[in-house]
Amino acid sequence: MLRTLIVAVMIASASSISPLHAAWVGAFMNGNALYDACMNRDPNSFCAGYIEGVADMASQVGLACLPIYSTKLQVTDMVKQYLTKHPEQRHYGASSTVQVALTEAFPCQKP
């Protein structure tokens, strides 16, 4: 959990994250490893917990604006869909890839 928090803070400090910018050195795991973990159907799995941690941080720092009533299962399913539909992005850091999926699905409105 601490690693996820540290990684999420590093992502949040970047002014603009895109899949091209997400390939920073030092990722603890990449999208391929997260995708493999996500093939487990247990909603309380490592996959769901990892995604929830990145989603919480992205939400707190305004990188993604998740709907108030979204559930962990819904957000996990959405990220799993992104990982399935974008295998070309899975070599990037897992937290960056999750953040990109979240910001595409749940963009925050600019003031």
Image: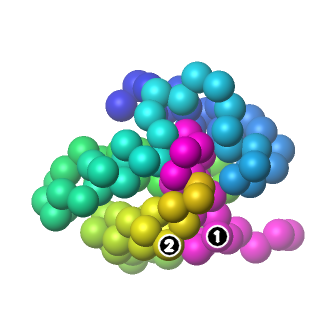
Q: Earlier in the sequence, mark 2 or mark 1?
A: 2
Q: Which residues are magenta?
A: 90-111
Q: What residue is rendered at 42% in x and 48% in y?
A: 32
Is 31 a magenta residue?
Answer: no
Query: Dot 1: what SS?
Result: helix
The amino acid type, in three-letter code, at marker 2 is: Lys
Q: Quadrant of residue 76?
A: bottom left
Q: Nearer the viewer, residue 58 or 18?
A: 18
The quarter in which the C terminus is drawn is bottom right
The amino acid type, in three-letter code, at marker 1 is: Glu
Task: Return the x and y of residue 95 as percentages of the image width and height.
Answer: 52, 43
Is 100 a magenta residue?
Answer: yes
Q: Which residue is mark 1?
A: 104
Q: What residue is rendered at 69% in x and 53% in y?
A: 19
The quarter in which the N terminus is drawn is top left
Query: Dot 2: what SS?
Result: helix
Q: Nearer the viewer, residue 57 or 48?
A: 48
Q: CA distance from mark 2 to mark 1?
A: 13 Å
Q: Is residue 26 left or right of residue 67?
A: right
